[in-house]
Image (tube, rainbow, N blue to C red):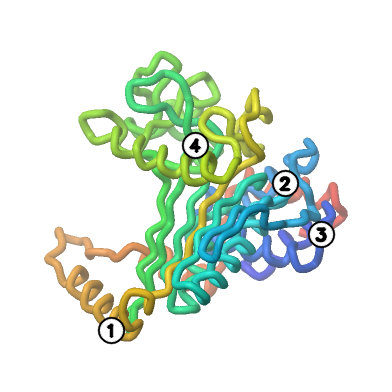
Amino acid sequence: MNFQYTKLQEFIQQVFLSIGCSEEDALLASQVLISADLRGVDSHGIARLGGYVRLYDNGRLNPKPIIKIIHETPSTAVIDGDKGLGLVVAPKAMEIAMEKADKVGSGWISVQNSNHFGIAGYHAMKALHKDMIGWAMTNAAPLVTPTFSKEKLLGTNPIAVAVPAAENPPFVADFATTAVAYGKMEILQRKGAPAPLGWVQDKDGNPTDDANAVKNGGALLPLGGDREHGSHKGYGLGAIVDIFSGVLSGANFGPWVPPFATAGFMSAGEQVGKGTGHFLGAMRIDGFRPADEFKADMDKWINRFKAAPAVEGKNVIIPGDPERELEAERKANGINLLEPVVNDLNALATRFGIKF
């Protein structure tokens, strides 16, 4: 079924208002969530709305958090998100990072006591409007096995970096450190489709195409899939995100990161910190060289890569291009939602007395 993105955003906003969020926070959260659908990251968009409500129902989400700095230097800070929506905590943390970058050249914020923050790219891209390079990463519930392990110890732990250019659209890399984000597995589950080999392993550590493998004791695999294809590198990237987001901030880390509501379980056992952790950064370009010169060189970089000979029927892409093109298409022509997602949204509409 096809829907206008503005109508979907209004519905998201109404749901967040219904669980007690302020007008400001409900609007911000709706903007972050719908940005995922617009950019084609359907696994992290409105399909997850019911999951945030379940977090609220289970007492794990504070709809009116008092977000505060608990430790600070001129260029760094640790923020306590007070169990708020990560969709709200992370953008506000990025604002603080940019304020620090304005003053001293760069700003780095580690966040504790937060929740799932949507797509990392949204937060990194906030820096683009100020001629800054943006960074965003977050740890997540343990769904991922380290290379050669049968135990789930890491999350999908995404990394996003946004870099402005002059004439060209910005470079925006936004990716999970796993072979696939768990939300993609949820989409396959809704469709009743198998998973490509290299995405997951079963409970005994064997390759499988079962889209429900994680729910049945298996695990997602790090980026690379197996050792021969570089899974140790994906494992290393995921570990870096976990350390920066969790260990550095005082949030939970490793197997103790609390799960999102769609993970199939709601508790993460013994706690070693507070909530979910994020790490965000903003770097002023003119802290290194004149911004106009840098952006002109970024244009040269982008143009040269786009000019590379491509395999037949394909174009060389710049990170961020497919998402930007899809955003323009979906803004014009609407967003298609799977029937199970529509059913979930209708259930929320009934519960809160909202028109969908």
CA gap, disc 1 and disc 3:
45 Å
Residue 293 is tagged as: 1
CA gap, disc 2 and disc 4:
19 Å
* Amino acid type indicated by mark 3: Leu
Judged left or right of residue 113, residue 311 is left
Please tell me how crowded label 3 is: few (under 14), some (14-19), or many (20+) other residues with Cα within 10 Å. Answer: some
Residue 88 location (% of width, % of height) = 67, 59
Instruction: Tell which residue pokes out farthest to the right in this image.
Output: 353
Residue 127 is tagged as: none
Residue 31 location (% of width, % of height) = 63, 66
Residue 155 is tagged as: 4
Disc 1 or 3, which lies upstream in sequence?
A: 3
**Vertical placement of residue 231 versus 314, above or below:** above
**The quadrant where residue 295 appears:** bottom left
Foreground mark, 1 or 4? 1
Disc 1 or 4, which lies upstream in sequence?
A: 4
Disc 2 or 3, which lies upstream in sequence?
A: 3
CA gap, disc 1 and disc 4:
38 Å
Under circle 1, the secondary element is helix
* Amino acid type indicated by mark 4: Gly
* Amino acid type indicated by mark 1: Glu
Q: Observer-nearest residue: 41 or 166?
A: 166
Disc 2 or 4, which lies upstream in sequence?
A: 2
Judged left or right of residue 289, residue 275 is right
Residue 80 location (% of width, % of height) = 68, 50
**Vertical placement of residue 275 versus 215, above or below:** below
**Residue holding disc 2:** 83
Instruction: Tell which residue pokes out farthest to the top in this image.
Output: 204
Foreground mark, 2 or 4? 2
Q: Identify the residue at image location x=77%, y=43%.
A: 56
Q: Observer-nearest residue: 286 or 321?
A: 286
Residue 17 is tagged as: 3
